[in-house]
Image (spheres, grey):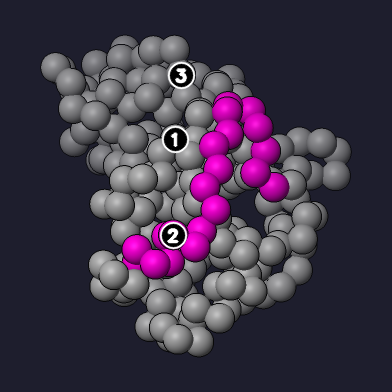
């Protein structure tokens, strides 16, 4: 287990090393392959999860079967914790995007732990507040930002999580299909592909299979505003 990655999660951020070690030892490790489901929308929310490696996407499905991709999460990020503060069915489905390792903790065990370490609850609430802020930003973008701007912003966000410096730019192996990338920005696949092709034509990025190399980050940042 990469402790440096795990310690980035809000669950561990307020803990000293010894306490964090004890908590990690009490958690259940799991490994899932691409396409497998961690939990389904409507399932009982009984655990939270911390990603050690890999990628997980959170999505909701409409009544007519259309899927909306809410977020793509990577190492050091946590999900499923909302059920601790607001018991009820899961509001999204968590799919594994690439082979993923994570550790989980049941709500009952977590509540007992928070009684002894209330400072952790504050860290977790701060994490939820950050996620809510990002959700509000996403809603504003849908109203005020055009599709190319949202595509640029999504690529930059993915770069922050999964980007690796390579010769000529930043390689972002997002491992999303074209349809998933379109769902992430709330637009049609055709419109998103047109924006990506335009960015590539301008020399801002190089497209790959479920990956992209960002060449001109400054131009993308200005386009994302």
Which residue is label 2 attached to?
Answer: 25
User: Seen from this angle, which residue lies furthest left?
Assistant: 167
Q: If you read the primary sequence from the N terminus, does the residue marked by circle 3 or circle 1 appear first?
A: 1
Characterize the local packing of mark 1: few (<14), some (14-19) or many (20 or more) Cα atoms within 10 angstroms. Answer: many
Write down the quadrant of residue 201 in the picture: top left
Q: Gap in Å between the C-alphas at discs 2 and 1? A: 21 Å
Q: Residue at x 55, y 22 (%)?
A: 177
Q: Which of marks 2 and 3 is nearer the N terminus?
A: 2
Residue on which disc 3 sits: 210
Q: Residue at x 41, y 45 (%)?
A: 52
Q: Distance between the residues labelled 2 and 3?
A: 35 Å
Figure check: 113 above or below 102 = below
Q: Please tell me which residue is depicted at 30% across the width and 52% down the height of the picture.
A: 3
Label 3, secondary structure: give it. loop
Q: Does the magenta stretch include residue 115?
A: no
Instruction: Identify the mark nearer the N-term, 2 or 1.
Output: 2
Residue count near mark 2 (Cα–Cα under 10 Å), binned few <14, some 14–19, many ≥20: few
Viewer-nearest residue: 62 or 27: 27
**Label 3 packing within 10 angstroms: few (<14), some (14-19), many (20+):** few
Nearest the eye: 49 or 61: 49
Q: Give the range drawn in magenta.
A: 20-39
Q: In which quarter of the image is residue 154?
A: top left
The numbered mark at residue 204 is: none
Compared with 99, 56 (above or below) is: below
Residue 152 appears in view:
no
- The disc placed on residue 54 is 1
Q: Is mark 2 on a helix, strand or loop?
A: helix
Q: Position of 136 compared to 16: left or right?
A: right
């Amino acid at each position: 287990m990469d402790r440096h990655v795990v310690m980035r999660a809000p669950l561990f951020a307020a803990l000293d090393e010894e306490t964090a070690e004890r908590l990690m030892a009490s958690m259940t490790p799991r490994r899932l392959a691409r396409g497998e489901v961690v939990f389904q929308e409507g399932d009982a929310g009984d655990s939270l999860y911390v990603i050690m490696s890999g990628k997980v996407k959170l999505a909701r499905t409409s009544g007519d079967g259309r899927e909306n991709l809410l977020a793509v999460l990577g190492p050091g990020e946590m999900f499923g914790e909302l059920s601790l503060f607001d018991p009820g069915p899961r509001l999204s489905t968590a799919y594994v995007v690439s082979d993923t390792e994570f550790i989980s903790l049941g709500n009952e065990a977590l509540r007992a732990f928070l009684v002894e370490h209330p400072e952790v609850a504050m860290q977790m609430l701060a994490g939820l507040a950050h996620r809510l802020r990002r959700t509000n930003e996403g809603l504003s973008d849908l109203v005020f930002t055009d599709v190319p701007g949202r595509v640029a912003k999504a690529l930059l966000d993915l770069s922050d999580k999964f980007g690796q410096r390579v010769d000529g730019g930043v390689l972002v192996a997002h491992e999303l299909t074209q349809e998933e990338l379109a769902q992430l920005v709330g637009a049609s696949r055709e419109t998103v592909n047109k924006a990506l092709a335009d960015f590539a034509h301008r020399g801002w990025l190089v497209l790959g299979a479920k990956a992209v190399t960002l060449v001109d980050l400054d131009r993308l940042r200005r386009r994302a505003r």
